[in-house]
Image (cartoon, rainbow, N blue to C red):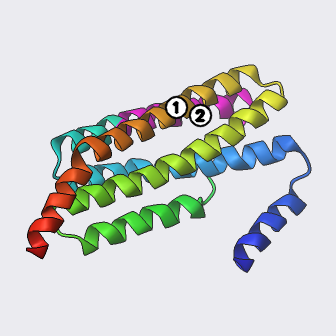
Amino acid sequence: MTDFLFTVLKKEITMDTLRDLFVEELKDLYHAEKQITKALPQMAKKATSGQLREAFESHLKETENQISRLEKVFKELDLTPKGKRCEGMEGIIQEGKTMMQELDKSDTLDAALIAAAQKVEHYEIASYGTVRTYAQQLNLKNAANLLQETLEEEAAANEKLNDLAINQVNAEAMSGSKDENE
């Protein structure tokens, strides 16, 4: 926790304006999205539910479009699109990889994949909400609209995962667990 606070404080010290913070957060998101494009195919491959696999594959296409939107925001700011290491997303993705390694290909694995994916979505929802608000406050209307579009996609992806968990995957994992206990 101390290292995290130091990193946050260090950021505050080196950033003079809201625009500086906005750019740093965009770089963080850009790297996070790049990481997600590598993780989603692995998650799709591990999924036993066809609907879950399709959800991951569909979100990969959305993620590629989200990267394009971020590139448009960078261009609007006259900056070259580039990321900076997103440690938060690295941790979330690593946790998901560990889970995939620990669980066999099973209904329980699908439930764990959804949990991992929802952690990613929640991180993105928080991050995109923040940068969208910064863009609004900086009077960057086009950037704010692009970021809002991505924010809405992330919320919809989270809802889709939630519905899939509630209506299919978690019930299947429960019956799988029941069979193991009998």
Per the image, the residue denoted by label 2 is: 71
Taking the view exactly as shown, the residue that stands out farthest to the front is: 182
Residue marked by disc 1: 68
Residue situated in front as seen by the camera: 96 or 41: 96
Looking at the rendered image, the quarter that the N terminus falls into is bottom right
Closest to the observer: 129 or 12? 129
Residue 161, by quadrant, is top left
Placement of the C terminus among the 4 image quadrants: bottom left
Q: Which residues are magenta?
A: 59-79
| Figure quadrant of residue 144 | top right
Residue 29 placement, left or right of 140? left
Q: Is residue 82 visible?
A: no
Relative to 122, residue 140 above or below? above
Q: Residue 182, can we see it? A: yes
Task: Give the amino acid at mark 1.
Answer: Ser
Residue depicted at x 32% and y 60%:
112
